[in-house]
Amino acid sequence: MKRTLYTAEHEEFRASVREFVRRWIEPRAEKFIEDKFIDRDVWRAAGDLGYLGLGVPEQYGGGEAGDFRYSAVVTEELARVAVAYASSFSIHYDVVAPYLIELSTEEQKKRWLPKFCTGELVSAMAMSEPSAGSDLAALKTTAVRDGDDWILNGSKTFITNGISADLVIVAARTTPEKKAKGISLFVVEEGMQGFTRGRKLDKVGQPEADTGELSFEDVRVPGTNLLGEVDRGFIAMMERLPQERIGAAITNIAHAKAVLEETIQYAKDRKAFGQSIGSFQHNKFLLADLVTRLEAAQAYVDHHVLAHTNGELDAVDAAKAKWYSAQVQNEIIDHCVQIYGGYGYMNEYRVARAWKDARVTKIWAGSNEIMKEIIGRSLGF
């Protein structure tokens, strides 16, 4: 299918990202799986090439591309290798970046954004808690004012980049009686006393991405690390979740596409009963179905990416793109495993790892059930 989302300039940019992936990620992919960690020099390389600061104003070290599609290109090329690379890096340049760009003071921008763009500083977003996953309004982490500072107490879990991050945006309750309207955002930095990291979580898939638990015990956060206005954190998160969710949708489809392409080639090469397994009617019809399903989902997501580029994507459409792309991704990859047969269940085959990697996409960035709840409310229910 010929896509109309990208211009020639975007495709030229894609070639540079693909070369970055070829040089910096693919040769060490097995190492990153074993280490359960993406080496920091890869972050620095991405920063040197300008991929980490595409939306950051030039005076703070960014490229200020002004076009979300450039970020989408980076996400697609990373996802083609593995979901973990897209999730780890896009948390930084697509999820955290808007908070630092749009909510920070001039002093904060000068303090954080230059190293954010170079990859010297890796970031994370700490929303989820052990007792509050998709229900952000129910978080229990608290921040109590003490003079000009805030005392932060609580814990977070399932935090992508949680073990390696130098800067973490933490959502905390500042006015408990106001419930969702009493949440604020704070920037917690490496080295702050009382800020500790717990386990590097042992996940079913995506071993390359470090996912951790964070604890805050009487962490004294300077008032200068308050991000945005007091008690406006929940609104800030709701306003920026659509970008996280369309980014997830981009990842889902790019990942499924790469696995399906490899599966089609496998079906051509693999022989049984004297012919390629792809020539059997069942497999041929199945692959025809999967290709069509993928292209339909791709067109749907592309439509919403363009809407977001133009500032027109709302929370409901982002929810639709997120859940539907995750569903299609998981269905396609599950069928791909079946086509590979016993080999599809072996970790040495990319399709097996992809199958495990994909399962969480129906859970993170708001579970698919929460996405349907958002959509259902828009229908008047």
Image (spheres, grey):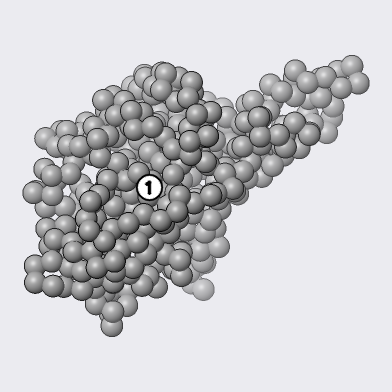
- Residue 39 on image: x %, y %: 38, 32
- Which residue lies at the image location 47% right of the left edge and 58% below the top edge? 366
- 17 vs 121: above or below: above
Q: Which residue is mark 1?
A: 163
- Which residue lies at the image location 37% right of the left edge and 50% below the top edge? 162
In this picture, residue 279 sits left or right of residue 39: right
In this picture, residue 322 sits left or right of residue 154: right
The image quadrant of residue 173 is bottom left
The image quadrant of residue 265 is top right
Query: Could you say which is closer to the camera, residue 73 or residue 1?
Result: 73
The image quadrant of residue 228 is bottom left
- Which residue lies at the image location 18% right of the left edge and 41% below the top edge? 113
The kind of residue tagged 1 is: Ile
- 44 vs 362: above or below: above
Residue 292 in view in this figure: no
Residue 26 in view in this figure: yes
Residue lying farthest to the bottom in this orientation: 177
- Residue 353 on image: x %, y %: 61, 37
Judging from the image, what secondary structure is the residue with disc 1 in? loop
- 11 vs 84: above or below: above
The quarter of the image holding the N terminus is: top right
Category of crowding for the residue at label 1, using alpha-carbon neighbours closer than 10 angstroms: few (below 14), some (14–19), many (at least 20): many
- Which residue lies at the image location 8% right of the left edge and 67% below the top edge? 148
In this picture, residue 273 sits left or right of residue 114: right
- Residue 130 on image: x %, y %: 45, 66
- Residue 232 on image: x %, y %: 23, 67
